[in-house]
Structures are given as structure tokens and as C-alpha cells.
Amino acid sequence: MRAICLDEKKSLLAEISFIIGFSLLMVLSSYVRIPLFFSPVPVTLQTFVLYLSILFLKRKAFISQAFYIVLGLTGLPVFSMTGTGLLYLLGPTGGYIIGFFVVALVFGYFLPHQKTFVKIFLFFLIANIVIYTIGASWLIFLHHFTPGAAFSAGILPFLVGDILKIALVSSFALKGK
């Protein structure tokens, strides 16, 4: 009986460590950024880390995203371009950050059990479309972009990089089978 309790404690500690670890990886990935002169949204590695968190944490991936957002809301410089607080979250990249949370919350429940490259790739491609939709909608409704401008500034520059990130995560998913 005692051995079971110790194993459960170790498992809980490992789970908490992974959740915190992925939150910290989100912070680090936000600092790996390429500002675009024609867009208020920089290129970052955040979707890559988000998708890895869904692979490893599954249904609990949203907790790491929530923790990441809470860290930023408390004033720690965790968002891209060392942004902090609620005002940053209401800015042009806020929709993408909210999209990260929504994708982690929903897609963690639907990760394909039978993993093939195509299934995982399509799964994360759909997740990416959700992030684009939330991010571009944020630009349209809160920042008064036209739909064309939101597409040109908030989706188009990221397509190739996101497809490469999704392919890389899909490859990792197969190695972890």
C-alpha cells in the first residue's frame, strides 16, 4: 500500500514538473522571435512548443498554457517582445495567445490514438487553423483590421513556418509511439 502512494506522488510530481516545464518553454519560445515590419505579430516558436505540450500532456496541456498566461498577467515579461499584463493581452497578439489556450484545452482531448504522420499532421493543421481564426478575428474585431489585412498580416506570413513546425512535431509523435 505504501509503495503505491509513493508511486502516485512521484507521478504527480512528474506531471507538475512537465506542466511547469512547458509553461517555461512557452516563455523561452516567445523570446525566439522574428519581428515582421508589415505585421504586429512576430514569428515565434510558440506553436511548436504548444503542439509538443499537447503530445506530452494531452488533456492537461491547457494547464501549462493557463499558467503561462497567468505569469504574463502578473507582470512578468513572458509574452513575445517582453510584453506583460492585461494591456499586452488585449494587443494584436492577444488573440493568438488566447488561441493557444483554446487549442490546448480542446485538442488535448482529441489527440489521435493511432498515430500516423498524416493523422498527426492533419490534427495539428486543424489546431493551427483554429489559432489563425482566433488570432485573425482578434485583429479584425479589436484592432479594426479588414479581413484581407488580417489575413495578410496575421496568417499568410506564418503558413510555411507553421507547416514546417507541424511536420517536425508530427515526426516527434511517431518516434514516441
Image (cartoon, helix red, strand yellow):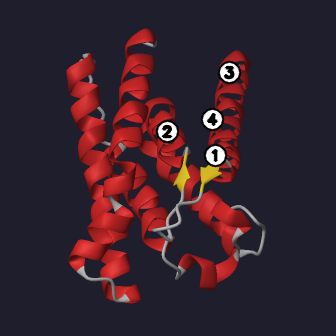
Residue 28, given in percent of the width and then of the height, sits at 70, 46
Tell me the residue that label 4 is attached to.
15
Residue mark closest to the camera, 4 vs 1: 1
Q: Real-space Cα distance between discs 2 and 4?
A: 20 Å
Residue 3 visible somewhere in the drawing:
yes
Compare marks 2 and 3 and give the one earlier in the sequence.
Answer: 3
Q: Nearer the viewer, residue 2 or 13?
A: 13
Looking at the rendered structure, the secondary structure element under dot 3 is helix
Which class describes the residues within 10 Å of circle 4: few (<14), some (14-19), or many (20+)? some
Compare marks 4 and 3 and give the one earlier in the sequence.
Answer: 3
Residue at image point 43% right, 27% down: 169
**Amino acid type, residue under disc 4 in the picture:** Glu
Compare marks 2 and 4 and give the one earlier in the sequence.
Answer: 4
Q: Real-space Cα distance between discs 1 and 2?
A: 8 Å
Q: Nearer the viewer, residue 63 or 7?
A: 63
Tell me the residue that label 2 is attached to.
48
Looking at the rendered structure, the secondary structure element under dot 2 is helix
Looking at the rendered structure, the secondary structure element under dot 1 is helix
Task: Identify whether 140 is placed above or below 55.
Answer: below
Quadrant of the rendered structure where residue 21 is? top right
**Amino acid type, residue under disc 1 in the picture:** Ser
Residue at image point 40% right, 20% down: 173
Residue mark closest to the camera, 4 vs 3: 4
